[in-house]
Image: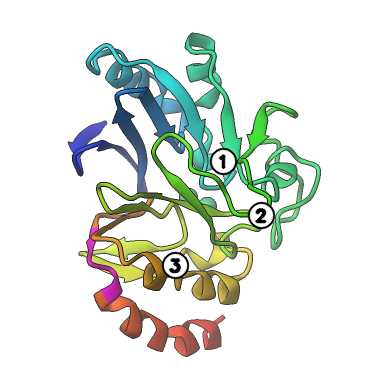
Amino acid sequence: MQVKRISEHIWSLKTWMIVPINVWVVADEEGITLVDAGMPMMTKGIIKFIEQHNGLSLQRILLTHGHSDHVGAIKGILKKYEVPVYAHSIEIPYMEGEIIYPKRKKLENNLPKTLTKPLLEDDSNTLMKIGGLTPYFTPGHSPGHVVYYHEQDQVLLAGDLFTSKKGKLKPPMAVFTADMKQALASASIIKHLKPKQLEVCHGNTVYHPFDQLEEYEQRKEKILGGK
Ligand SMILES: [Zn+2]
Ligand SMILES: [Zn+2]
């Protein structure tokens, strides 16, 4: 597993399974937040990294969404740490096997029922900040997909809202994406936040993604037309 410090407070832990798979460790004075949990084979490496990290302890696991390649290490991590797992309330019934993910043929039981807690929302249904990160609802790749923004570092942890190649923003993988049109519309979060740096689960860092947004959006028709 490759460990890389990507900003002042954030590390990426990466492995490869045909495509790269990243998870992120966000650290501050309060402790450590893990964003996404990759594949089961990453369990040992994630725990080892947390254990060696300045005596800080794991506080929580946040999920961008509940696909199996984002929750794999949770079982093993929870054997060692008793921490809550959060995802968007809309995503939970899909990952717990109550509703079939769009475009999939059967139910997925990616995590046991009642394990995952919904991300908290305020009175106006805005997702509340957690572990130094602000979640934003960005549906499309999955029905309850969220991205997490670290304001201080200006880093957007974008999960599978995008992929990337050689520093270029690319759309999420079509076969695994529930609603591509909606996913492309959710890309406008970049306009809203203008992050300095964007990280995807399956790819490398994209710097100043706002500069590429117009080009990305121009490809929309081609992407949707080619469906
Ligand atoms: Zn996914
Ligand atoms: Zn994925």
Query: Could you tell me residue 173's position as x and y percent?
Result: 47, 64
Number of residue marks: 3
Mark sitting earlier along the chain (3/2): 2
Q: Residues within 10 Å of mark 1 (few under 14, many from 20)?
A: some
Q: Give the number of the disc on residue 125.
A: 2
What is the span of residues highlighted in magenta in the rendered image? 206-210
- Secondary structure at numbered mark 3: helix
Residue 128: in magenta span: no
Quadrant of the drawing holding the C terminus? bottom right
Which of pointers 1 and 2 indicates the residue nearer the eye?
A: 2
Report the front residue among 105 and 197: 197
Q: Quick check: marks 3 and 1 in contact, CB under 8 Å?
A: no
State which mark lies toward you, 3 or 1.
Answer: 3
Task: Establish whether ligand 2 lies closer than 8 Å to the Cβ of label 1.
Answer: no
Q: Horizontal and vertical percent for residue 39?
A: 46, 34
Name the one closer to the observer, 189 or 181.
189
Residue type at mark 3 is: Ile
Q: CA distance from mark 3 to mark 2?
A: 17 Å
Say what amino acid the circle numbered 2 marks: Asn
Instruction: Determine which quarter of the picture holds residue 166.
Output: bottom left
State yes or no: Cβ of the residue under disc 3 lies below 8 Å from any atom of ligand 1. Answer: no
Residue that badge 1 annotates: 68
